[in-house]
Image (cartoon, rainbow, N blue to C red):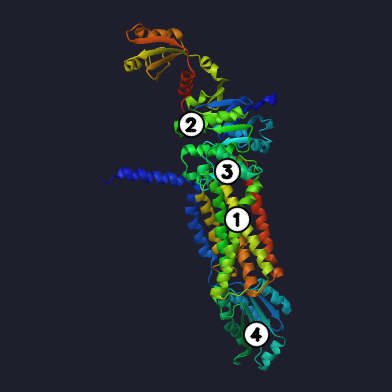
Amino acid sequence: MSESLAIDVQRLTKRFGEKTVVDDFSMQVPKGRIYGFLGPNGSGKTTTIRMMCGLLKPDAGGGTALGHDIIHESRQIKSRVGYMTQKFSLYGDLTVRENLTFMARLHALKNTKSVVDAALEEYALAPRADQLADTLSGGWKQRLALAAASMHDPGLLLLDEPTAGVDPKARRDFWDRIRVLARKGVTVLVSTHYMDEAVQCDNIAFIAYGKKLIDAPSADIPERVGLVTWRIEGKGLQPIYDALHGADGVDQIARFGSALHVSGRDAERLERAIAPWRGQDGLIVEKAKTGLEEAFIWLMTGSEDNFQ
Amino acid sequence: MTSFSRILAIMGKEFIQMLRDRLTFGMMVGIPVMQLLLFGYAINTDPRHLPTLVEMGDNGPASRAITQAMETSEYFDLIGLTTSAEETESALQSGDVLFVVTIPPNFERDLLRGDRPQILLDADASDPVAAGAGAGAFPTLVQEALAPMLGEMHPPVETVIHRRFNPAGRTALNIVPGLLGVILTMTMAMMTSMALTREAERGTLETLLATPTRPHEVMIGKITPYVFVGSIQVAILLTGARLLFGVPFLGSPLAFLAAVSLFILVNLSLGFLFSTVARSQMQAMQMTFFIFLPSILLSGFMFPFAGMPAWAQTLGQALPTTHFIHAVRSIMLKGAGLEDVIHDIWPLAVIFAVIATLAMLRYRRTLD
């Protein structure tokens, strides 16, 4: 069974001093999947990823990545995993090409030059090959980091908030590349707190306060969250927003273009709250399917920041 | 308008930050205390109790009066008597003693006959400061020691002083080889510790640790370039010493090579060790200074090692710079060979083994 799993970890626990950062965390990621790793800041995403590739030793629990024990075989894991850190962590005082060459040599790749040339070509970095990494913009740094992390043909990519602080176009481009890699059979575990990225994932694990709360295929997430949603479309939505915000039965209200999505856990109380606006002229009020978007806003706001 | 509350706010914030940065605060308190103790107690520019060997050719009451007087003067510590000229020579060469007093055979007889016998004082003048005071006091001391025995017979003896290794008493001869030690201590330890903490500070250490690279590969790869840098520094200093100051190189190049390579390795591993403790380049630099100061003050670089009190000498023995400077001076100025400086080489080897082991043990293989 572990043959078909890229990541198989059980009951991982990590403490820093008094604080338990990751608590009894288990997860199984099938090969070839894009797995989204969601949670607010400080929820333990980075720590979990670091334990999976042998950068941190768990205080309890264990498991395998690509079939290798995460505690005792971290060297084998490291040579088969591409890890992209949250903060750009290549050498700013080296050029793009020098950085890639360095990484290729650390992975003891053969034909370093042709591997690097191929990576420069594939990631359209060739025109900037001789530019110092520090002088690249955020989006280009990200691209360089992904190139560096995937040059040795890893079976598993661990991407820790790869698109934080990158403009939307660069983010779209980045995700196109991730899907290309996934189609080649690479398993991708990507942490994020962008909703539009989460929807691109096949599966989603949601973590807060170091605990995994939800782990399901993306399509099943709205149902798991258990929200009922109404959609209100029309003109003059602001007064409605103000009136419904915090009203009894309304757990969440969000604006999507020219419509309001009003959600709540209790269908009856929500319906009572909505009632005054039903049948009004120029307003379309209808029951809607709770989307991933509502589910995420709900999950993210429900657990705020985890730094305490 | 000046706002006092703003000034107070900034002051308060500075104090909080200062107190949180334990290491810096420790340095600010520690350095004055250390300096005070070292300058007050350990450093002595009028050094006394310098190790002295006496070659006794004659064992009569006059000779004993002289050795007695030398002890009483406090300039000399008689660490032994010998009758072998070879032994005295090697003791001087290796730096075990700073003075050798030779009392010739039949000294007593010649003295009483009024033949004005000679007493020879060989002084290791490679450190002019250390040798100066004792050598200056010696003739008077001898005359006074013999006065009660001889009454009016003036002058009964002739004292001959040989300033060995540095007859002109030039300070440059002593300082330049010492500089080699101090500069290597400073730059080697600082450069490696900063180069490594820079990786941690910029986050590139995580990238490095996430690859299959082994710890010793990192250590060797990071240290080797600095061995080259160190060699260049040595070459520059040696050339400059020769051309500008006329500092000779009399001893064995092999012994020199052994001492220098070992010493560079010691300092590089020391830098590596610092980097496993320091969390920033700033801290790494501060730690280097903490070792740098005693290395200047207690190693015999600036002030005569033999003139320091016993506890300070013990402390100094723990510093690699002490052994290195000692060995290099012997090699360059006194023409010492490997066998003469072996007692400085093995402590360096021991210090290297200890520091390198500590550094490897402390090196983080993970981000824990």
Q: Residue B119 carries which label?
A: 4
In which quarter of the view is residue A267 placed? top left
In front: mark 3 or mark 1? 3
Circle 1: residue type: Pro
In which quarter of the view is residue A31 placed? top right
Query: Disc 3 designates what residue?
Result: A100
Q: How far apart are marks 4 and 3 (CA)?
A: 75 Å
Identify the subunit bearing mark 3: A
Circle 2: residue type: Arg
Labels 2, 4: one chain: no
Establish if A273 lies above or below A202: above
Rendered-image quadrant of the N terminus of chain A? top right
Labels 4, 3: one chain: no
Looking at the rendered structure, the secondary structure element under dot 3 is helix
Circle 3: residue type: Leu
Task: Kindly identify the residue that appears in the image at 49 percent across and 53 percent down.
Answer: B27
Which residue reaches farthest top?
A279
Estimate how packed mark 3 is, as few (under 14), some (14 to 19) or many (20 or more) residues with alpha carbons within 10 Å.
Answer: many
Query: Disc 1 designates what residue?
Result: B225
Query: Disc 2 designates what residue?
Result: A171
Circle 4: residue type: Ile
